[in-house]
Amino acid sequence: MAAALTLARRMARSGVLPLCRQLLAWGRAPRQPPGLPLAQCRAFSNNKIMVELDESSGVATMKFKSPPVNSLSLDFLTEFCISLEKLENNRACRGVIITSAVPKIFSSGLDITEMCGKSTEHYAEFWRAVQEMWLRLYGSNMVTVAAVNGSSPAGGCLIALSCDYRIMVENPKFSIGLNEAQLGIVAPFWFKDTFVNVVGHRVAERSLQLGSLHSAPEAHRLGLVDELVPDEKLQEKTGAVMAQWLALPDHARQLTKSMMRKAVLDRLVAHREEDIQNFISFISKESIQKSLRLYMEMLKKKKG
Ligand code: CO8
């Protein structure tokens, strides 16, 4: 409840209210009377994420479009949570495909500028939004498929890991992984739990300690992604996988998903405030701030 209120306050402050109205209107859209052709597709473009719902199949697509790298800023995370919640509450929607409209990048992970030189209050608000994003996505009742069409480090990888199935473009230049250790920071326990649940303890332990970013073929070998496809086949393959998952009765699949994920979700819910305090005290350390600044400088130098 407290989280929902924070989110609502944040929506009011961040000017996402027009988006909320749009989403609410969409959620309330009258259902087509039987016998009439369904409105095939509802689409709207927000600031950072484009959402499209095909009512005939019950499948929505959330396409990240926040150049240059789809970094997960506070605004991005807020928009993500609102969009996902509206889809979750829309009976016409049973599955969501998450992908990117930015060439070569799925998501660069958490926006590092949100974790540098900001106030304690800001860190708390930002981290609550990161938690909220994961709780909603990992705990979603819908079928979630990540169509990873570009690099996906850290928080970007977490989004993919939180889906039910991951299909990645087979380009060996695209990488994915939880590389936090390379930045001198530590992936929180619920990032780790999500990773372990996908690839197993040994692979996760090694990959996390080394902060590895795995090329697409390597990620496939490790089980981090389920399938590799050529770019031009991504849409078709994602649609086919989604159809396969949607062929099952929702209630059986949803209860099974909840059974598999509940313990991990409950762990964060039970330790949410503590996790926020841990994040604040960790990220506020001068040594950590220095590591992040150096990392950002390194990213900029790499260009020149
Ligand atoms: N946040 C903010 N800005 C970023 C980020 C980011 N995550 N990633 C890239 N940028 C910026 C770059 O600085 C650059 O800015 P500018 O144009 O002003 O110089 C711009 O985006 C474009 O970046 P690149 O030139 O590097 O673009 P490329 O297409 O060459 O490469 C990559 C794209 C591969 C995504 C590359 O930018 C990259 O590797 N980025 C860093 C990714 C990363 O390491 N993310 C980790 C974030 S931390 C996280 O998600 C989890 C933290 C958990 C916290 C736990 C604490 C307790």
Image: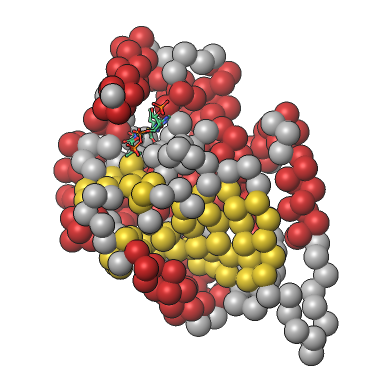
Q: Residue placed farthest to the front in the image?
A: 304
Q: Please say if 120 is above or below 259.
A: above
In the rendered image, the quadrant that contains the C terminus is: top left
Name which residue lies at 49% across and 46% down: 134
The image quadrant of residue 51 is: bottom right
Q: Please say if 112 is above or below 194.
A: above
Judge by depth and name the residue closer to the eye, 78 or 205: 78
Name which residue lies at 68% across and 56% down: 44
In the rendered image, the quadrant that contains the N terminus is: top right
Ligand 1 location (quadrant): top left
Judge by depth and name the residue closer to the eye, 74 or 257: 74
The location of residue 295, given as percent across then percent down, is: 30, 23
Judge by depth and name the residue closer to the eye, 207 or 69: 69
The location of residue 267, given as percent across then percent down, is: 45, 44
In the rendered structure, the answer to whether residue 212 lies left or right of residue 229 reads left
Q: Please say if 190 is above or below 93.
A: above
Name which residue lies at 42% across and 59% down: 146
Name which residue lies at 60% across and 35% down: 75
